[in-house]
Amino acid sequence: MTDSAIPRSSATELPTFADVLLAAERIRPWAHRTPVLRSRTADAELGASLFFKAENFQRMGAFKFRGAMNSLSQFDAEQRRAGVVTFSSGNHAQGTALAAQLLGIPATIVMPLDAPAAKLAATRGYGAEIVTYDRYQQDRAQICQRLADERGMTIIPPYDHPHIIAGQGTATLELLQQTGPLDALFVCLGGGGLLSGAALAARALSPQCRLYGVEPEAGNDGQQSLRAGRIISIDTPRTIADGAQTAFLGDYTFEVIRRDVDDIHTVSDAELVQCMRFFAERMKMVVEPTGCLAFAAARRMREQLQGKRVGVIISGGNVDLGKLAGYLAS
Ligand SMILES: *Cc1c(COP(=O)(O)O)cnc(C)c1O
């Protein structure tokens, strides 16, 4: 089942690069400046220079902390008192819960019953109240809206909000500050917060850079939308990339993506598993399936990337260790 009415933000303007710079100032005291990692093995495999932005090492294990902290730190006194409510399949929940805890703001998170156990536990661990729902049967947006109406809480959606987009854009801002201009940048795509934020930073700091979004094959609504020139909705896709199980892009994210993104690619779950194995074996790190989308697509484009400087955003590292062991053994 897809969501009927995702709550919209009241803002009407698309975020800009200036908003990304302001977001970077706001989150600086709280967020990690994550490292950019290199791998000779990856460079040799692709015949290119790869720069991996390791957001799996961000606080709470994914870039989502950036957007959540940028949003919550702009709450006024009344909003801080009543708190924040949001819906998420995992990392936005943890990012919001942690940002709220750090700022002393109450948080309620609407999460799917089948979200990874590690993500449910971590969200509770950050002190948030959790309300669960069945993602194949129930409308999370309605549940969220009811909680907002009853308790006067502010809804911060996972991607379609200018403050979220600007916050996520700080990952690419940092990457480009760390590497200088790039020839190509690969960014995973769920609802498009990370990709549209990346577009704002890349178009300002590295205008010649080719910018690619990457989705799971089973959930290529973004690719369909870019080609159709309007937002296409699909049923909740079944893929191991649980951070990209979104059914449609947002209004804000689609506008930026349509304007600034060169193309959207897809990869299979099997390719994601191969990348998880590569990251574990060669780079000694844990990357969640969704965090592998960008590298999996770059691997497919070896021919076009010869000799190029290529950015790859590793978006997160939150995966149940039991599941990870299964993927690595398969
Ligand atoms: C949320 C998430 C994504 C997708 O981000 P969007 O802003 O929804 O496109 C990708 N990877 C990870 C690890 C995530 O948590």
Image (tube, grey):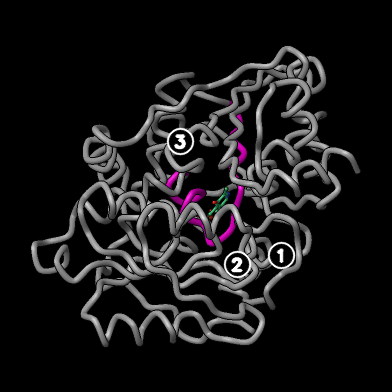
Instruction: Indicate which disc residue 123 carries.
Output: none
Q: Quadrant of residue 2?
A: bottom right
- For disc 3, the marked residue is 58
Circle 1: is it few (<14), some (14-19), or many (20+) Cα within 10 Å? Answer: many
Q: Quadrant of residue 134?
A: bottom right
Circle 3: is it few (<14), some (14-19), or many (20+) Cα within 10 Å? Answer: many
Task: Decide: is 32 above or below 70.
Answer: above
Distance from label 3 to label 2 (Cα)? 22 Å
Task: Decide: is 77 above or below 296.
Answer: below
| Dot 2 amino acid type | Thr
| Dot 1 amino acid type | Gly
Q: Left or right of 219: which side holds 11?
A: left
Query: Which structural element holds mark 3?
Result: loop
Q: Left or right of 101: which side holds 238?
A: right
Mark 2 C-beta closer than 8 Å to ligand 1: yes
- For disc 2, the marked residue is 246
Label 2–label 1 contact, CB within 8 A: yes
- The magenta span reads 183-198
Circle 2: is it few (<14), some (14-19), or many (20+) Cα within 10 Å? Answer: many
Task: Decide: is 115 above or below 204.
Answer: below
Q: Earlier in the sequence, mark 2 or mark 1?
A: 1
Task: Decide: is 45 above or below 80.
Answer: above
Q: Left or right of 279: which side holds 202?
A: left
- For disc 1, the marked residue is 219
